[in-house]
Amino acid sequence: MNIDVIFRIAAVGLLVAVLDQVLARAGKSEYSVLLTLSGLLAALLLLLPYLSQLFRSLRTLFDL
């Protein structure tokens, strides 16, 4: 895993955290929840190739 993927996920997390606080203080808590869920989805999409590689390695390891 490259270190840049970790930095990208951290950047998404920081951006979501800041925007979440702004929306929460503005009284838009429902948008805040949607933003948090979309941030989680974005982080999972960044990890998707690595998760796929992990599952392929596990399949090979256990001969499934």
Image: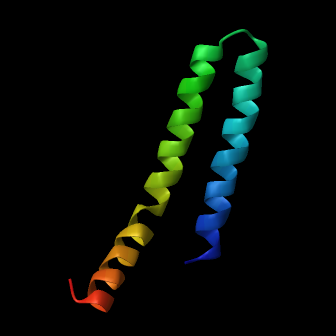
- Residue positioned most to the top: 27
Direction from residue 15 to residue 25 in the image, left or right: right
Direction from residue 56 to residue 9 in the image, left or right: right
Q: Up-down: is 6 above or below 17?
A: below
Residue 56 point in image, percent of width and height: 30, 79
User: How many numbered markers are drawn?
Assistant: 0
Q: Quadrant of residue 19?
A: top right
Q: Determine the residue positioned at 53% across, 51% down.
A: 43
Q: Determine the residue positioned at 70% across, 19% down.
A: 23
In what quadrant of the picture does the N terminus appear?
bottom right
Direction from residue 3 to residue 53 in the image, left or right: left
Direction from residue 17 to residue 49 in the image, left or right: left
In what quadrant of the picture does the C terminus appear?
bottom left
- Looking at this view, is 53 or 59 the one in front? 59
Q: Quadrant of residue 15?
A: top right
How is the structure coloured here? rainbow
Q: Determine the residue positioned at 53% across, 26% down.
A: 34
Q: Up-down: is 3 above or below 14?
A: below
Residue 39 point in image, percent of width and height: 56, 40
